[in-house]
Amino acid sequence: MLNVPPQAFPAPSSQQRAAAGGRAKVPLKPGRSLMDWIRLTKSGKDMTGLKGRLIEVTEDELAKHNKKEDCWICIRGFVYNVTPYMEYHPGGEDELMKAAGTDGTDLFDQVHRWVNYESMLKECLVGRMAVKPIAAPKEITSVSEEKKQLNGMLPEKKVLGASKDLTPSYDWFQTDSLITIAIYTKQKGINAELVILDCEEKRLRGEIIVDDYSYLLEVDLNHAVQEDMAVNIAEKVGKVEIILKKKDTVHWKILGQPLENHNTFMKRTDRGLFYRKCKLVSKTEVTHDTKLFCLLLPESTHLRVPTGQHVYLKQIIAGTEVVKPYTPVLPFLPLDFQEPSCHDSAHIYLMIKIYSCGLFTQALDRLQIGDYISVSNPEGSFKKSQVQNSEELFLLAAGTGFTPMVKLLNFALTEVSCLRTVKLMFFNRTEDDILWRNQLEQLALKDERFEVQFILSQPVRDWVGKQGMISSSLLSEFVKRSRKDSKVLICICGPAPFTEQGVQYLKDLGYSQEEVHPFTA
């Protein structure tokens, strides 16, 4: 709840903790923090009980290790003895026991696919699962076969879970100075937010998001290209053009060598997260404990974070890779919503609360201007159509759970003409904790459709606004249909208990699952 003091990692009152799967975390015993776990893994203690040996594990052998005092789990073909990690797991022992003695890959992906378990559990590695031998894949034996692959013909084995007729394809052509790659998505409505491109040295990676799937083009280019590239999108026909500038005016015989996942079309959840290094260019104070970080994308990256989606930041802390989700915001709340605003696409802005005992946020706060941090591709289930089909929008936020509401407010008031009202109910401990209070109040004065209400759990005596924590009575006053048949959308984000309780209260008040969107990773 909002009155719980922050703990180590991640803090219970952070939006990021809620984003990490939306599940309530179990209080850890003293001496069981992330930093304590890192120290233990570096102590030299035998974490597997095998004295450093790696073994091949059969299904029968794995199944024997299914108790709290002897727990092995398989993730993506690798088996880990998680027994020593039990007391350090933020989700509690019971969550780990759900996968005890089994392949826990699906469960892991559902809860926190973004966690780098290889780094966290490297000292717990028992070995690989024993598998039956399979036939080796056919090698490319001729230039013609290689050209077929690199000119966009997708082998059937790479059409994963989708109709072949709907599978994207690509082609490429060149002039003396340019390379143009044309991707045919076979989908209408492809926009800049659905195209993610990175080109580092000669490695080109282009990912096109198509609903729950993604098409990946990944090539080690035949020759070097300049950093700046152009992206042209024909939304009506679903064609994406990537235009690269040659460094040297030479004729390319092939586009390049295909990398492992080149020319594949699969569910987004089956792809690993991709990161690029972004430079910290500014860090400004928002409140006494919250800062706005501005990160500069590489010049050779095309990335737009869609409304309602988050990214992951990755840092190496004490030799261990640690990852946390954050929802990008705007640099400020625009007050003129007459025209759709064109925001700076070269930067990512993150509003982050710095916890005194927070291992990750303390490391973030120590970053100097000019330092780099790894930022992932966007993820999230929110769709703009949820707002576009609504007449009334209610936003329930606690603390930094406000961050997904920033872009949502901008989109709703700028581009959704059918919305009659947009209301924000913002829960905080004290007045000093309210993020962008002045901007929100100015926006409420400027746009008659928008209303904001601040609720404090620890107000001073002269506070005249509402006080308390999220409750059925507060929500019944605030979330009301103006008409019986009004189409409403209610978005909620905050600490896991706040979100879980809010969703239940709304259900009790008669709102359907389709009318409520909790922001979780």
Image: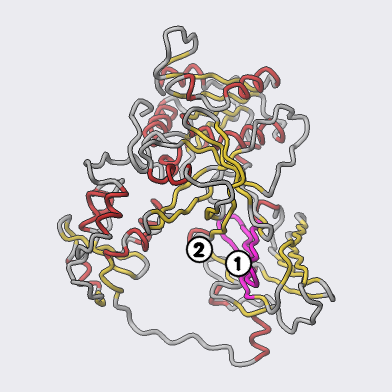
The residue lying toward the viewer, choosing from 157 and 498, is 498
Q: Check residue 213 for magenta coloring.
A: yes
How many dots with numbers? 2
Q: Which mark is residue 216?
A: 1
Image location (x, y in percent) of residue 253: 74, 84
Q: Check residue 208 for magenta coloring.
A: yes
List the single residue furthest toward the left.
Answer: 69
Q: Is residue 238 above or below residue 146?
A: above
- Residue drawn at 23 percent across, 60 percent down: 43
Q: Is residue 179 above or below residue 396?
A: below
Image location (x, y in percent) of residue 266: 54, 65
Q: Could you tell which of marks 2 and 1 lies nearer the N-terminus?
A: 1
The three-letter code of the residue at mark 1 reads Leu
Report the span colored magenta: 195-220
* Cα–Cα span, label 2 and label 1: 10 Å
Q: Is residue 306 above or below residue 185?
A: above
- Residue drawn at 47 percent across, 14 percent down: 466
Image location (x, y in percent) of residue 200: 63, 66
347 horizontally vs 310: left or right: right
362 horizontally vs 383: left or right: left
- Are circles 2 and 1 on residues that touch, CB within 8 Å? yes
The three-letter code of the residue at mark 2 reads Arg
Image location (x, y in percent) of residue 30: 22, 41
Q: Mark 2 packing: few (<14 Cα in 10 Å), some, or many (20+)?
A: few
Label 2 belongs to which residue? 271
Q: Is residue 87 visible?
A: yes
Could you say whether the residue bearing mark 2 is in a helix, strand or loop? loop
Q: Is residue 237 visible?
A: no
Q: Which quarter shows the N terminus?
A: top left
- Residue drawn at 55 percent across, 72 percent down: 261
